Image (cartoon, helix red, strand yellow):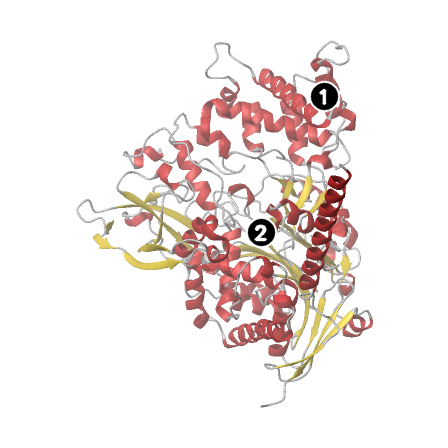
Amino acid sequence: MYQLFQWMVRIVSAALLALLVAGFFIWYFAARSLPDYNATYEVSGISAPVEIVRSTEDVPHIFGATDRDVFFALGLAHAQDRLWQMTMLRRTVQGRLSEVFGADTLKTDELMRRLDLAGAARKSLAAQDADTRAALEAYAAGVNQWITLVNEGARGRGAPEFFLFDAPIAYWTPEDSLSILKLLAVQLESQIETEVLRARVSMLGQDFVRDILPDMPGQGTAALPDYAALFPGTPRAARVAESAPPPLSPFPGRDFAGASNAFAAAPGRSAAGGSLMANDPHLGLTAPSIWYLARLELASGGVIGGTIPGIPLVLTGRNPRLGWGITSAYVDDLDLHIEALDPARPERYRTPEGWASFTTRREIIQVKDAEPVTITLRWTENGPVIPGGHFNLATITPPDHVVSMSWTALDTADTSMSAGLALMRAGSVAEAAAAGERYIAPAQNLILADQTGVGMVTVGAIPARDPGHVTQGRMPSPGWEAQNRWQGRAPFAKNPRFLDPEGGIVINTNNKTVERPFPDHVSFDWGDSQRVQRLTRLMGEREVHTRESFIAAQLDTVSPAARGLLPLVGADLWFTAAPAPEGTPERMRQRALELLAAWDGEMNEHLPEPLIYAAWMRALQNRLIRDELGPLASEFKHLEPLFIERVFRNTEGAARWCDVMQSAPVESCTDIARIALDEALLALSEKYGPKIESWRWGDAHEAVHQHQVLGRARLFGWLTNIRQSTSGGDFTLMRGMTRGSGAMPFENVHAAGFRGVYDFADPDSSVFIIATGQSGHPFSRHYDDLAELWRRGDYIPMSLDPELARAAAAGITRLEPAPAP
């Protein structure tokens, strides 16, 4: 027995020793890829010495003799900190993920190959102006120089992920940067799923679309034909389909298309006499963040703000004379078309002039640990053909038809990169607005502030449509009818713009910007109807604003949806029942209603009320739509405030949703509200305990910054993922969009990865923050050092004063021109 014990001790000791040795080697090799920010390198591709001055927070301030040298150094800095992220973005847009991850990502690769965004980017290089091509070439040379230094200096392959995945690193090209800008359009896309969903709901009949997918207030309902009437071969009952996106898909889903806030005040509305501006773009939370802070010293002056690794642009930020911010414009810049196949020759499709052959090309997708897969790409005159396995297209495609896509992001002469570089050098609102004419995709609202005024202009191509378009672009349309095809592009002068408004303030929260009839409408679907109410109120409450009032607005956590819906939904429930005994469901309901009645709608992480409200509205909407929509109800993962409001106001008879169709009694909206509240409270008590006062919104609403690949594995997820209790919600200005499904539906997964506030009365008092840290290396102290500041609503200063940057340097990387061979 004693000998057995001795052997067990030896085996356990040996196993622990082996783990320690393995851990040491993992740490040693992973740590090799940590860059030395105080090094000096001799490099090819610069004309004179360059300094990359790193702040305490690892923000690079780049000083060079020429703009080309500065962009070279930005490429090198991006690669130092985010090489894995950059290569993943490139593989995604090229459709080459399966080379590394195997068959799991094959569906994502297949879709990206069919869209051929990388091919469109390659063709668009020739359309850029000379300065932009020079910047792209210099940036690519900087990235490649770091890859060379990694290889020559055995610097851990540049990132620890490369040890875990056999992912050869190809050298960077200018086209790669152009393709990643196009990938941003993918990450902001919502029109595909919206068109498909509207068609599927339409096929259920009973005018359900009018209620569950209503138009934004202020705009009349468009008279549209029933989808099944357009395509009689399509079944009227929408078929069940899988809604989960494939692994590593860059398409965010309808609810997670890009969102943002941006607002600006002219000097007359500023206490200090200088223009003010704030911007916080919202994207899916990741570790590291998609955003990377940087400062570039260009010949036109310093530029500082948020960049995306892989792209040599400050997408949101300021220079000494101008500040700019971006919000998703929700332009209807994508249409789906149903294409009829020739019954006799299915390699042809119908056009207004007769049958035409598809343009085709075969491509081979290499798959790790599997045989290569060959696919045939097809294009029509309207755009690429997308198979029915994507976006639930099979559910709305008649037999002997296929679906094609028209999309501005597929433009092969896209000059958006040139527009972005011109914006960085602009010195006034007028110059910046003019630069936007060359911007194609993704469509953005550009909010601007200079020393004397403010403005907003929508940049991005807007398709010109025929007034006779049968679905007005709101659902897939017959692609063989001429009136359903795009008629070119609307002139830039017709894009919405608001320069030097009379009130001195411009705001945008992805809300509707213009009231125009089709086809000049810009869009039927907008990204917000709630946040704009709160921001309008905050901007109007003060005659003059300060940097602090702009920060307070950016961090505001009051939900206008909660303030508007609770009085409606609970109108017949407040204080109407006799006191119930402690420990009963009735008593729990009464206590919850007491708390909600006194609540001001602030989605504070430390309060129980936001959790009660969110769970109640989730249960309520599910009960309202489940019997009418059936399986389609699962497509509505988030609260639709306009729908709930229509139902409880009985707008156009919408209260009919409260009656359960399959039951004999006629349920009222009050009945359904009460049942839903009891259901929500029961679920919350099972998860968080029976004491309501101990519940915390932050326990359910944790921000989840997940590593795109490693974060899915429990062991690596513990090392790479960042989780934080957060305030805010789906409809607050400090937005924290919830997951909407699964075991933790209230997790915060989509929020402001970047925040900036600029004060032109004292420009160097401007402040910035990103959601994680600058480094993408999990072993770096800069991997998550900004995350807690972000969670608390704190910022870091970023000055354009060169001397201040050098005085506070935490490290200086010096690049010296390599001697001529």
Q: Amino acid at mark 2?
A: Val
Front in this rendered view, residue 637 or 800: 637
- Lateral position of residue 305 relative to residue 343, left or right: right
Q: Where is residue 303 shown, x and y percent of the image?
A: 67, 68
Horizontal side of 778 relative to 331 (left or right) equals: right
- At label 1, counting other C-alpha atoms closer than 10 Å, the crowd grade (few under 14, some 14-19, many 20 or more) is many
| Most foreground residue, 265 or 7 | 7
How crowded is the residue under tag 2: few (<14 C-alpha within 10 Å), some, or many (20+)? Answer: some
Give the residue at mark 2: 709
Frontmost of labels 2 and 1 is: 2
> What residue does disc 1 label?
593
Q: Position of residue 561 (x, y in %)?
A: 64, 34
Whether residue 249 can be seen here: yes
The spot of residue 674 in percent (x, y) is 63, 17
- Ranked by sequence position, the earlier of labels 2 and 1 is 1
Residue at the farthest left position: 344
Where disc 2 sits, the SS reads loop
Q: The residue tagged with tag 1: helix, strand or loop? A: helix
Residue 543 seen: no
- Identify the residue at the far right of this view: 807
Give the CA separation, mark 2 to mark 1: 43 Å
Residue at the (34%, 42%) spot, across then down: 470
Q: Quadrant of residue 596?
A: top right
Identified at 57% across, 45% down, the residue is 511
Do the numbered discs 2 and 1 sit on residues whose CB atoms are within 8 Å? no
